[in-house]
Image: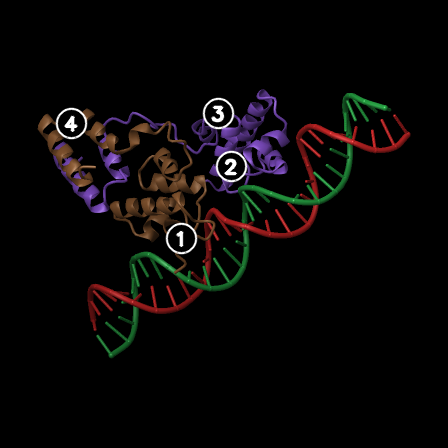
Chain colours: A brown, B purple, C red, D green
DNA sequence: AGCATGTGCTTGGTATACTTAGCGCACACA
DNA sequence: TGTGTGCGCTAAGTATACCAAGCACATGCT
């Protein structure tokens, strides 16, 4: 229920919750597991993921750390950083990161980029 | 768990207050003036500068903006960014870029990362 | 002297970030 | 057919970030 915005949760914070949930599932962690690592309670994590609360920067950093992603990315997702500094985080970043990875052969890079482009579509 | 920084003000937050006060005086602004621009109350700014409270990231960003310094610098001063590898992380950049790409679904991210790991040897 | 306007700070209250206890549901195993 | 353990979520309480009103001390003006 309560899908309407409750003045605490709207816009960027909702998408932040989705982002966190996605990262958590990507890491195959349950809410309790992530909450344990990030040292927050699992109900609170639940509310954050559903966009009901705006977590403090400390909590954000802790979650980012637990998910093994940079705090900067987290803040950027939360709209707390003017995106002037995070220019290479968008879709261009994946292709760029693939291109500059010294462990990949040219063929492997081409394969990954082709798959990536098929995922994100022609847009 | 570092049980000594559970309380409101300690360490980095105190120096953050000093930092803010320094920047404010450098800009020749009174507390009320800065509070007005940053859209916070002047008593609260007073407490923040004296290290009594830990301002939220939103407030921090607002103050940074009012002082015309980057939010990144502010967070760094507040100890909210690990300045270890904020930028130019070369080799685990691909996985990170995939993880944070908003265009990819969780399943697609898993697929790409799996392929990537098979390429680089799964270490 | 007195009043006006500036400064930073204290007090007391409200909003909200965050926690501990517990619910309902699914899937195991006996 | 229970009974136990996992999941995410709800409810109710505590802690704290934050605000509005006002104090105490300056400086300036008349």
- Which chain is home to disc 4? A
Q: Which mark is residue B59?
A: 2
Marked residue nearer the N-terminal end (3 or 2): 2
The correct choice, above or below, for B6 with respect to B78 in the image is below
Q: Secondary structure at mark 4?
A: loop
Residue A44 screen position, x and y as percent: 41, 52
What residue did someone put label 3 on? B69
Residue B59 screen position, x and y as percent: 51, 37
Give the spatial CA distance, label 1 vs label 4.
40 Å
- Looking at the rendered structure, whether the residues under marks 2 and 4 are on a common chain is answered as no
Residue C29 screen position, x and y as percent: 20, 67
- Looking at the rendered structure, whether the residues under marks 1 and 4 are on a common chain is answered as yes
Q: Which mark is residue A47?
A: 1
Q: Is residue B102 left or right of residue B5?
A: left
Give the spatial CA distance, label 2 vs label 1.
22 Å
Give the spatial CA distance, label 4 vs label 3.
38 Å
Q: Secondary structure at mark 2?
A: helix
- Looking at the rendered structure, whether the residues under marks 2 and 1 are on a common chain is answered as no
- Which chain is home to disc 1? A
């Amino acid at each position: 229920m309560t899908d309407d915005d409750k003045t605490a949760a709207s816009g960027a914070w909702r998408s932040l919750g989705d982002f966190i949930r996605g990262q958590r599932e990507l890491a195959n962690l349950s809410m309790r597991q992530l909450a344990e690592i990030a040292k927050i309670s699992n109900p609170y994590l639940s509310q954050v993921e559903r966009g009901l609360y705006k977590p403090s920067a400390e909590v954000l950093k802790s979650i980012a750390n637990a998910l093994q992603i940079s705090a900067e990315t987290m803040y950027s997702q939360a709209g707390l950083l003017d995106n002037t500094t995070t220019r290479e985080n968008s879709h261009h970043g994946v292709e760029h990161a693939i291109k500059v990875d010294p462990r990949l052969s040219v063929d492997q890079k081409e394969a990954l980029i082709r798959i990536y482009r098929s995922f994100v579509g022609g847009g």
